[in-house]
Amino acid sequence: MLLCWCACFSVTFEELFSNILAIQCTEVFEYGISLGCTNFVLSSFHLFKYLYLLRLVDYGLLEEVRRAQVI
């Protein structure tokens, strides 16, 4: 059990909190809500968008990063 507990601390912030599929699904949700409410902003999500853009840069997808909406 101690080994599992120690292994938990070796996981980085990005690995633990920024699943790419979850970020993409949340972006779709945010976009859908913003269609009905133009003032809607999910400010707590900005960190994850930033991490997602960093991953796109790491993968060499610079065109995708350029097309991303920056708030």
Image (cartoon, grey):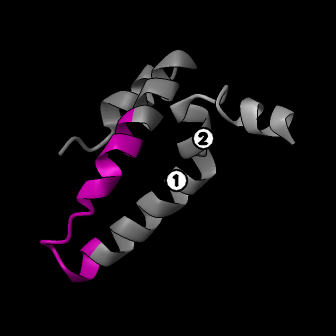
Q: Nearer the viewer, residue 48 or 28?
A: 48
Q: Does 38 appear above or below 50?
A: below
Q: Is residue 13 left or right of residue 41?
A: right
Name the residue rendered at 42%, 58% in the picture.
Answer: 27
Tell me residue 17's x, y (percent): 54, 44
Tell me residue 31's x, y (percent): 35, 66
Which circle marks residue 24 in the picture?
A: 1
- Image quarter (top left, top right, bottom left or bottom right) of the N terminus: top right
Name the residue rendered at 33%, 40% in the picture.
Answer: 68
Dot 1 alpha-carbon crowd within 10 angstroms: few under 14, some 14 to 19, many 20 or more: some
Name the residue rendered at 36%, 67% in the picture.
Answer: 30
Counting the numbered discs, the total is 2
State the separation of the CA atoms marked 2 and 1. 16 Å
Q: Does 53 appear above or below 57?
A: below
Tell me residue 35's x, y (percent): 27, 76
Dot 2 alpha-carbon crowd within 10 angstroms: few under 14, some 14 to 19, many 20 or more: few
Q: Does 8 appear above or below 24?
A: above
Q: Amino acid at mark 2?
A: Leu
Range drawn in magenta: 34-50
Q: Does 26 appear above or below 16?
A: below
- The secondary element bearing badge 2 is classed as helix
Residue placed under numbered mark 2 in the picture: 16
- The secondary element bearing badge 1 is classed as helix
Principal SS element in the magenta part?
helix
Q: Is residue 56 left or right of residue 69?
A: right
Counting residues from the N terminus, which is met first, the one under dot 2 or under dot 1? 2
Residue 20 is inside the magenta segment: no
Residue 40 is inside the magenta segment: yes
**Is residue 18 at all visible to an observer of this figure?**
no
